[in-house]
Image (cartoon, helix red, strand yellow):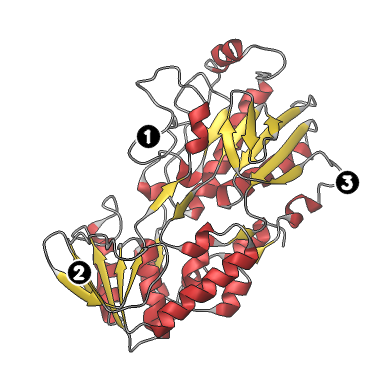
Amino acid sequence: MSSREIHVLVIGGSWAGITAVNELINLSNGPYSGLRVTLVEQRTHYFHKTGVIRGLVDPKYADKMFISYKGLFRDSELSNPAHRFVCARLTHVYESSVEVEGGERIPYDYLIIATGTTPTSMPVTQSIDDVECRARYQRMRNAIESSRSILFVGGGAVGIGLCCEIAEMYPKKCLILAHSHEKLLSEDLSGNFAANTELLVKKMGIELILGETVLSNTAYNEEEWVVTPQTVLTKSGRRIPCDLVIWTTRARPYTDFMNSLPPTNERKPLVDVDSGCINVRPSLQLSDTRYPNIFAVGDVNSLPYAEKYATSAVLQAKHAVSNMRILMNESYDFRIKMSPTMAAEAAAKANMASYSSTRNTQMVVALGKNKEVSSTIFSKFSSWASGGSRGRNYMLDKAEKMLHA
């Protein structure tokens, strides 16, 4: 327990970030009355990226995907007005402060980075203003509606889900799903799960091309959906005719802001060079022990692909706050009472808990509004028969509850 003033910054306002903020506000309303929580997010609103593929075929659903952040701090405004929301893009992370676009410096004792990833081929996910976001959404819907033959590149959950949503809405369109691996979804999922998914996708009339790497078409900007007759080539030389190509493979975390934070050892970078993800320890702290008060949760960290889902992001955020609480209880003050070196040495002795993987929990992939495939036998058959909850609303109800909307 601690009543001393502790500043916690959370960067990123999606599943992991909002969960962390809620957990921290609960602590501030209880035994940690000195907690000061700041959420930094470049969007003016929460955008429900989990349901982005449903919004592309259902405008009424899309209207519900924009949720204000105002409700997040509403209940705590009277008890702790020090909590705040900063609408700005993070540009630099330093040892005891961050800098946002415009030059404002915000100090912290603890930092949780939850900036996630952004699919570069989904223009709507890159908009930070809701007006621009809605306009891009409409342009993407228009492209889908006017096309006759669509090639989807990438057989992960997003590619499969979007393809199936369009197959339900436009059953007469020619839909092709190409994936560079021999089976759908992640290589670290079971073969039976992938095989069951493949069977259901084919039953919806979707052509699958597996084990083929699609080459980029430099004649078109892949970030803007252009409807025009074209022939796409694969690495093996196969030609695929279509009039719209939708890439769902290109999602990379934005971690340029980490360049201002020096690593202890240049041979052990804070950010993985290949993936762009922030390297973390099992405690979800940065891998560099020099920064025990910085955590990275959700898609932005270096955990395996099987952890890149909303449910896992929520669990990671709760775990990070729990470990942060251990440091608070031990009075490791990273900004006032100790030098960074002394604090790091003291924190290294703390008994931090390791994050438990969610690989053995239920994995669900939506196949439109009325079907989903699950990694558990019982839920698999029940969801096939009656339509699964994931496919119905893509957890929008849970997001509204999380944001106190």
Q: Can residue 203 be seen at all in this image of the molecule?
A: yes
Q: Is residue 200 left or right of residue 335?
A: left
Whole-angstrom CA distance, mark 2 to mark 3, is 57 Å
Q: Position of residue 134 (x, y in %)?
A: 59, 70
**Quadrant (top left, top right, bottom left, bottom right) of the C terminus:** bottom right
Q: Which residue is mark 1?
A: 272
Residue plotted at (46% across, 69% down): 53
Q: Quadrant of residue 171?
A: bottom left
Q: Which mark is residue 219?
A: none
Residue at the image point whose x is 72% and y is 30% from the top: 7
Residue 320, placed above or below residue 96: below
Q: Are marks 3 and 1 in contact (CB under 8 Å)?
A: no
**Residue at mark 3 to residue at mark 1: CA–CA distance:** 42 Å
* Most distant residue in the bottom direction: 172
Q: Look at 45% across and 21% down and name the residue there.
A: 263
Mark 2 and 1 residues: CB-CB less than 8 Å, in contact? no
Circle 1 packing at 10 Å, graded few (<14), some (14-19), many (20+), is some
Task: Name the side, left or right, on which 153 lies relative to 2.
Answer: left
Mark closest to the chain's N terminus, 3 or 1: 3
* Position in image of residue 280 (x %, y %): 44, 32
**Residue flagged by tag 3: what amino acid is it?**
Leu
Q: Eyeballing the image, is 104 above or below 293?
A: below
Residue assigned mark 3: 78
Q: Quadrant of residue 333?
A: top right
